[in-house]
Amino acid sequence: MSEVEVTEHTEQNAEPRIKQIGTLHTPYKRLKEVPYQSSLSRSEVGSEVVCEIEVFEEYAGGLKDIEGFSHLFVLYWLHKSKGYSLLVRTPWDSELHGLFTTRSPNRPNPIGISVVRLLGRGREGKQGENFLRVSGIDAVDGTPLVDLKPFVPAFDEKGEQEVRVGWLESIGWLESRIKK
């Protein structure tokens, strides 16, 4: 068994800072091409859109054992975001809603999050242990990656608890998307 180098990083985190740990590679070259939500990221023919997550070499060791997870949370910096308003209109409703009750990319801290399906490690047909192939990203090509976390249903799904979705219930948007 090979020896694994364990390095502890003890940087002080008193001030909020975010480090870019990689880059998202997607087919979406312009903002208007990006799906509104990661669950809507399908090609015109309905198949999954495959994207790549590049993790910078200095963070690649953190990918150990990732192949054992089917889904990941991907957090990224919405670098094309321009300003924000505390009241916004969404694509699904003409009424104004509080920014923090929406998924608008224009926020004080423009952090995006997607739950993606992990398809494999490495680049399509090439080497690259610091690359992940995924489906379900709703970000423009070149978006900075800030973190990856495993999706664990026992931790992340709310199960029997009542989950409310605020104003989305009142406009009937949700009912049309729930498969019964």
Image: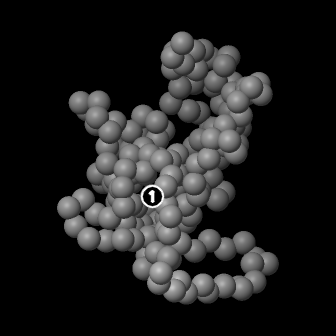
Front residue (pair 37, 133): 133
Asked if residue 30 can be seen in this view, the reply is: no
Which residue matches tag 1?
Answer: 67
Front residue (pair 49, 27): 49
Q: Residue at image x 26%, y 32%?
A: 44
Under mark 1, the amino acid is Glu
Q: Residue at image x 49%, y 61%?
A: 66
Query: Would you say 152 lies left or right of 64 here?
Result: right
- Callout 1: few (<14), some (14-19), or many (20+) C-alpha neighbours within 10 Å? few
Spot occupied by residue 149 in the image (x, y as percentages of width and height): 58, 58
Whether 175 is drawn above or below 146: the answer is: above
Spot occupied by residue 36 in the image (x, y as percentages of width and height): 46, 38
In this rendering, the count of numbered labels is 1
Whether 39 is drawn above or below 7: the answer is: above
Q: Quadrant of the C terminus?
A: top right
Whether 33 is drawn above or below 97: the answer is: below
Q: Residue at image x 54%, y 19%?
A: 178
Q: Residue furthest left?
A: 125
Disc 1 secondary structure class: helix
Spot occupied by residue 145 in the image (x, y as percentages of width and height): 49, 64
Query: Would you say 132 lies left or right of 5 here?
Result: left
Colour option used:
one colour
Determine the image quadrant of residue 125.
bottom left
Whether 179 is drawn above or below 107: the answer is: above
Spot occupied by residue 111 in the image (x, y as percentages of width and height): 59, 56
Q: Residue at image x 59%, y 33%?
A: 89
Asked if residue 23 can be seen in this view, the reply is: yes
